[in-house]
Image: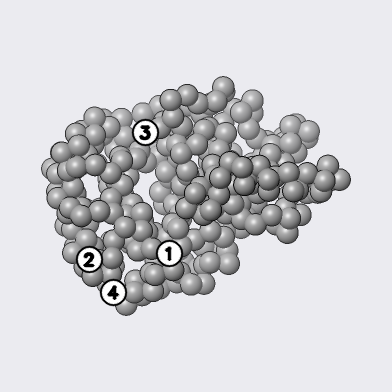
Amino acid sequence: MPYARYGESIESVVTQIESARASIEDGAERSDLQQLLPAGAARNALDCALWDFEAKRSGRRVYEIAGLPAPSPVVTAFTLSLGTAEEMAAAAVAAAPRHPLLKLKLGAAGDSERLAAIRAAVPSATLIVDANEGWRADTLAENFAACANYGVALIEQPLPAGADDVLARIAHPVPLCADESLHDRSDLGSLIGRYEAINIKLDKAGGLTEALALQKEAERQGLDVMIGCMVASSLAMAPALLLAGHAAFVDLDGPLLLAQDRENGLRYEGAEVYPPVSALWG
């Protein structure tokens, strides 16, 4: 999924993929992509396609090739869009019977009121807050306190990437998760002391190859891992499910937010998402 936040568009991603055409046709492997393309949606598309190609050529599943255990169904978060306190509380009530893990899009004035209304509406749901870089240094204490008061389990990206150094100097009553501040392994060093977790998205990391290495290094450095996604089809979610077994949180609800998914799409039953069939990927 090309993401405008990172300067990507469909056209720019297609151009990047075309720039690697000659190398791919000459036999470039997944490892070569790390030098051919930067982290992002284009490299993710090619990297995951090459994993799938090797699996179908060899008759083995990708998890076998990667030396991973077979993936199992996992509970995924379900995302509630930013709205008024009343709108979000109503959306939470509608979603909670099937989705006990809710991800709340916040990052605007009135977030404390939104949290109060949502928690009153769904007292037993597990809540993740995604502030989407929307809070400010002078509102952190108030927003952190509200999250702690209403039993939020995790806060994603409270401050803009590149302006989050203050997080190292303020108490975290709720664990913080880096999203926009984290793309690949080169970013990890700057996150220590600011965050307790990272959100790995294949479209940011630039593919399953880097995501696997990133997850391993994050765990070595004592960071929890969330496996996330952009709003995209089951084909984009399928590779990420190989990382989900060791993640503290999984947020792979992208296909549920689409009007139409791909053929052979992932199976969602209640809160759980099931591993892909080989006809889809891997």
In terms of secondary structure, where does tag 1 sit?
loop
**Hey, what amino acid is under mark 2?**
Thr
Q: Point out the frontmost of discs 4 and 2.
A: 2
Q: What residue does disc 3 label?
A: 271
Question: Do the residues bearing badges 1 and 4 touch, measured as CB atoms within 8 Å?
Answer: no
Question: Do the residues bearing badges 1 and 2 touch, measured as CB atoms within 8 Å?
Answer: no
Q: What residue does disc 1 label?
A: 161
Q: Earlier in the sequence, mark 4 or mark 3?
A: 4
In terms of secondary structure, where does tag 2 sit?
helix
Q: What residue does disc 4 label?
A: 170
Residue 262: tell me if it is visible. Answer: yes
Q: Residue at x 23, y 70 (%)?
A: 138
Q: Earlier in the sequence, mark 1 or mark 2?
A: 2
Q: Earlier in the sequence, mark 1 or mark 4?
A: 1
Q: Point out the frontmost of discs 4 and 3.
A: 4
Q: What residue does disc 2 label?
A: 139
Q: Residue at x 44, y 57 (%)?
A: 179
Label 3 Cα crowd, 10 Å radius (few <14 / some 14-19 / many 20+): many
